[in-house]
Amino acid sequence: MHKTIAWESEAWHCRHVTTPFAPYPGSSMNRRDVLRSALVAAGGAALVNAPRAQGVQDERKASPKRYKMKKSINLWAFPYPDRMSLKECLQLAKDAGFDGIELNYDLESDLSPKSGPKEFMAIRKEAERIGIAISGVCSFLFWPYPLTSNDPKERMRGMELAAKMTEAAYHLGAENLLVVPGAVHMPWREDHDPTPNELCDSRARTAIGKLLPTAEKLKVHLNIENIFFNGYLMSPMEMNEFVDHFDSEYVQVHFDTGNIMLFQFPEHWIPVLGKRIKNVHLKEFTKKGTDHSLESFRPLLDGTTNWPAVIEAFETVDYRGYLTFEYFHPYTHYPEALIHQTSDSLDRMLGRKV
């Protein structure tokens, strides 16, 4: 009886007694207004109205730290050449906010053995007109023509193509050429005859040694890429020993963050590689699935890479070069969306978004 009377008394008080947070009868205050007023009256004003400290970046939006690395994207992310021309890709990369674009050398495209200095210079001038740098040259041709193949004809063709790539990079005004020096095993090639480890290492060193004089003359860096599942240079210490063997500033490392994510972590490799890193592929990877093919690579930020740790590791070794997003699956619909989304993600990772 007393509890009921007390409750009714309190209820009447809440309905009819004017307080700093109780609405007047007929007032237009809604439930949110009442709760807000109640918090203020209870000393919660600081919680309701607390402004963010001036100059403090919201980490939900972007990195609170600004990094000086440059944004780049590989041509494989574009629907080239089926739905976009090279000129359109260069312009789109520029419009999306990239500092550079990495081009790919193959057997049929604008960058191929069918092209020469004249064609490459034309591409260079077009990129300069648009205002975007060519951050490097890349190629899948090291897989059908590995420099360490047991087939002498494959090795010879691989060397011929690598030499042509070096010259192409020079005429394009690109100082970086990605090189895959060899492979013990290529599980994606059913016809590949595995190369014994010692033989793979010997052939790789011989191949790079033969390519180096021209690269030094043209001032094109032969950047050795770490690869997944090829059984060669599988640790940063092995990579360092291989690169240091040549004692040349034109043999450096092209570090790929995604290629080691299946069993390792890029933030662990970067401090060990240090100043040897000349160019970078950012490949997003997910450890959540069981498909360890190219399908494991994802759009940027849609994976399990610890990007704050990775970017900070690059900062620690004073890396100021290109971060090139590499992805092999252009969107079927509205492919420009992938390019703009990637640029936005990089802006957030590098602290360019305010």
Image (cartoon, rainbow, N blue to C red):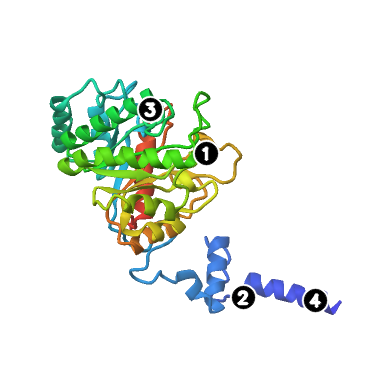
Whole-angstrom CA distance, mark 3 to mark 4, is 91 Å
The mark nearer the N terminus, 1 or 2, is: 2
User: Crowdedness of circle 1 by 10 Å Cα count: few (<14), some, many (20+)?
Assistant: some
Q: Quadrant of residue 14?
A: bottom right
Whole-angstrom CA distance, mark 1 to mark 4, is 67 Å
For disc 1, the marked residue is 296
User: Residue 98: percent from the left, percent from the top?
Assistant: 27, 44
Which label belongs to residue 145? 3
Task: Tell me which amino acid carries mark 1.
Answer: Ser
Does residue 237 sit above or below 8 in this rendering?
A: above
Whole-angstrom CA distance, mark 3 to mark 1, is 24 Å
Whole-angstrom CA distance, mark 1 to mark 2, is 64 Å
For disc 4, the marked residue is 5
User: Residue 302: percent from the left, percent from the top?
Assistant: 49, 45
Assign a secondary structure to mark 4: helix
Assign a secondary structure to mark 1: helix
Closer to the eye: label 1 or 2:
1
The mark nearer the N terminus, 3 or 4, is: 4
For disc 2, the marked residue is 17
Whole-angstrom CA distance, mark 4 to mark 2, is 17 Å
Task: Tell me which amino acid carries mark 2.
Answer: Val
Task: Tell me which amino acid carries mark 4.
Answer: Ile
The mark nearer the N terminus, 2 or 3, is: 2
User: Residue 195: percent from the left, percent from the top?
Assistant: 48, 34
User: Crowdedness of circle 3 by 10 Å Cα count: few (<14), some, many (20+)?
Assistant: many
Which label belongs to residue 188? none
The mark nearer the N terminus, 4 or 2, is: 4
**Quarter of the image with the N terminus in it:** bottom right
Does residue 103 sit above or below 15 in this rendering?
A: above
Front position in the image: 283 or 235: 235
